[in-house]
Amino acid sequence: MKNTVILILILLTNFAFAQQVKVENAKYKFISGEKHALKVNIFTDDIKDVLKAFQKELEKEVGTVTEQKKELILDNVIIKSITEDKIDAYVAVKKMKDNSSELYVSFEINNEIIEPKSNAYKQAEKFMETLSKDISIVVIEKELDKEQKNLKKLQDKVVSLEDKNKKLSQDSKDREEDIKKSQSKLKEVSEELKEVNKKMNSGKGKMDKLVKDKEKLDNDHEKLTDKISKDEKKIKDNKKDIEANEKDIENLKNDIKKQEKVVSDINDKRKAVK
């Protein structure tokens, strides 16, 4: 479902840029009051995305940019693609029901708002087209970063499970060797115990010593038997865990293929917009 939503977003932005960006005249009620503005559709309602795109177009260290209640106020900035004069601008974003957004920008040069009759109108209109593209690149790159991180998480999970399986396999091999050693030792203890029982039944030897030897051998036999049983159980548990991990790895690899497609599509979109 998540990947489907992302794909829809990519298709929407692809569709938008397959057509010419349309800049319109509008009235908008900014915090500072209603003003004439230029309007263009964008695919984010995050004012920080807009700010990041704006900063690419502004002359460095000229004027100020402040954020106020999710609006931007640009004071005495220079946007050379519009004019060499200093500009004041009021920027707001309105989210629409279809999850797209409308960007409104009111430009002022020498305290006069740029309108269709203004000398700088065509340049401002062209700037809005460029800005819309720049904002889309910001949004796409932010989405790309997010999806690349999601891809890395999936890949890391696979590596982690593969490492776990290697450790489980090695643990099983070590336990198989321990079982062989324990079985060999158990055989020796069983033979010794058989001899002690034979002496006790025949009445030969010192009975006190034979009793102590028998107690020790019985205890060793029990410990070895218990250890073999625990190692065998652990080997079976390891096998089950390895099989479960392998299924998870297979599912994760399928998810990785899907996520790689998501990342690839976003990369293609970024290249197309640039």
Image: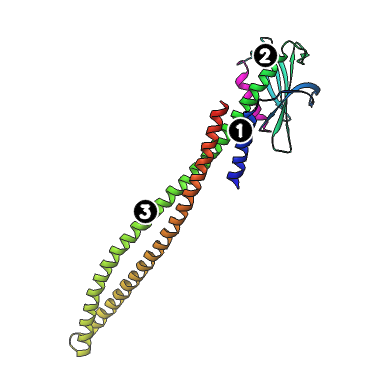
Please give the label number shown on residue 105.
none
Q: Is residue 52 visible?
A: no
Stretch in magenta: 44-59
Element on which disc 2 rests:
loop
Within 10 angstroms of label 3, few (less than 14), some, or many (20 or more) residues?
few
Q: Earlier in the sequence, mark 3 or mark 1?
A: 1
The amino acid beneath tag 2 is Ile
Where's residue 34, x and y in %? 82, 24
Who is closer to the viewer here, 164 or 122? Answer: 122
Check disc 3 and report the residue beneath it.
Answer: 166
Relative side of 18 to 200, left or right: right
Q: List the residue tagged with mark 2.
A: 82
CB within 8 Å, label 3 to label 1 = no
Question: Looking at numbered disc 3 in the image, what kind of residue is underneath it?
Answer: Lys
Of residues 10 and 143, the one nearer the viewer is 10
Residue 151 image point, x, y percent: 50, 42
Marks 3 and 1: which is nearer the front? 1
Tell me the crowding category of disc 1: few under 14, some 14 to 19, or many 20 or more residues within 10 angstroms, Cα based.
Answer: some
Q: Amino acid at mark 1?
A: Asn
Left/right of residue 110 with respect to residue 257 in the rendered view? right
